[in-house]
Amino acid sequence: MLDDFFTLLNDFFNPLDAALARALWNIDSQIPQEVLLAAALLSLNLSRGNVALNLNTLSFRHFFPSPKKLPQTLENAILALKDFDFRNQSAVFFVEKKEDWENLPPKPLLYWKGKLYLWRYFLAERKVEENILKRLKTLKKECNNLILNKLFENEEQKNACATAFKENFSVITGGPGTGKTYTVARLLALLLSENPHLKIALAAPTGKAAQRLKESIERSVNDLKKDFPHLDLSSLNPSTLHRLLGVTPTGFKHNAAYPLDLDVLIVDEASMVDLLLFESLLKALTPHTKLVLLGDKNQLASVDAGCLLGEICNAPILNSNITLLKRSRRFKENTGIAEFSHLINEGKSTGLENLFNGEYEDLNLIQTPKEFETLMNDFYQNNILLPPEKTENEASFTLYAQKIIERNLKLQVLCALRNGEFGVKGFNQTIENIQKKFTVSRGNSLFFEQCPVMMNENRVHLGLSNGDLGVALSFWIHNEWKTRFVFSSNPRWFSPMRLENCVEKMFALTIHKAQGSEFEHVIVVLPPKLLPILTRELLYTGATRAQKKLTLYIPEEAQPFDLLKKIVNNRLNRQGALFEPF
């Protein structure tokens, strides 16, 4: 009987999920199959970004959405877990009140208010709550309103700056172009004007996001020279959170015993931070460190478990510490992109079809490969850039490289999926074939002339980060054409050997990879059928990468607006309980 149960787990679950169930059984062979099944489902749920398993809303189609026929025994067993009593189970700690879990030895699993956790994740949620609530009690210092009025015309931005100045924990959230980093640059100017010796750090979840934060801060500082002539933020070099904390084989260098020596920490793209990383960050901060989170709460959540920014912004106890910036300067209020993004956020799926009736020049819908190829052909035809001759100097090649990178920022294809006909892999080949028709052939490299590339690993010593976009170009060296890479984040030229195995061709990006980026024209590619990954947050994130024009590519076999309605109504609903009262 038990062998049949584990065979079932091996057939329908990931190896890691089945392994957790077997590990619990190895500890105690008397554990009921219901607990083992719940553990496997919990592990599967974690891999999909959920901190816990909500037993009250269990649905076998949530875990197995494909039409593949499931054994009736498995379907029944999953549904029966709603009524299973998890009390008095050797592997489960049953929590009814706060005192039940404090200072007691952990068990692998924990049950609380209809949710099943791995102990580690339950503890992380409670520690994050505890740390943030302690920060709310620190001594507050009001900002000078005269200076604030001089720095800000926008009332929302002024309030955000005042809150962050006063509080030891604050969040500034808003969509693209609402001025989050603009506000923070002025916050830093105010803080440094009062104490020039403050120790400040800027960080983000990824190297690419950290680089963009640096660029945004630098642009904002130039506008502040009049009011703060001595302001110098050039020494602030944003890093990834992992680099800031110091990764070691056993965890992080900085922790509660060896905290970061900081007075102020600004974290950008906070929606991408997962629960366990944020817990580690809070552990590494002293109580007096001012922590300011920036991000768009409506964007995609982190790849790993948790929906941190969204849950923090929805916590009533933190209302006075959170400022929502609503006015975007990226889109004019009467543009199609602005209206489309607004309807997605509001969940108003019935009005989407009217936006694509030709009234808005910045919105477009295509449905066939021929339409897509025509669009791409027109783009490259109208943006041909001929490379320098071999006799020209290095400056000519550098200028040429900059023009190619600028051209690539004009149009970007974003896919909801990585694999398959409508994923990045399928579209990479299609776009490559089109682009090759408009470039000269030089050298014998895998990376042809003007081929767009992306870093897939960090190379800190070279100033390159995972996700950095660049281009492959030919350089005349030692009487032959040699391929070199150049990136927008670093004007230096790099040989393929120096970046071996950490650069890949990238004509299309996943929407996840494009977070924090922006392009003039974005083509968002959606598959013909609704999948669990196709959520309101994904569509919003993809659409708001576009500055001037948004094209949706929805295959002709789909009913495009029926699909869009389903996506808008399919909210990302990660299971957890951050700031949920006992």
Image: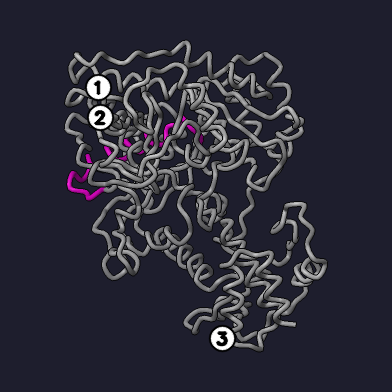
Determine the CA span between mark 1 and mark 2.
8 Å
* As drawn, 481 above or below 262: above
Going by the image, does 525 lie left or right of 557?
Answer: left
What is the x, y in percent for residue 539? Answer: 61, 36
Res. 398 mark: 1
Answer whether residue 360 is magenta in the image.
Answer: no
Q: CA distance from mark 3 to mark 1?
A: 62 Å
Asked if marks 2 and 3 touch (Cβ < 8 Å), the reply is no
Residue kind at label 3, given as amino acid type: Ile
Sequence-earlier tag: 2 or 3: 3
Q: Which residue is mark 3?
A: 27
Q: Given the image, on which type of amino acid does mark 2 rest?
A: Pro
The magenta segment:
175-200
Crowding at label 2, few (<14), some or many (≥20) Cα neighbours within 10 Å?
Answer: some
- Please, is residue 333 above or below residue 270 in the view? above
Q: Is 255 on the left or on the right of 376, as rendered?
A: left
Q: Quadrant of residue 232?
A: top left
Question: Are the two marked residues, 3 and 1, in contact with CB atoms closer than 8 angstroms?
Answer: no
Q: Which residue is mark 2?
A: 491
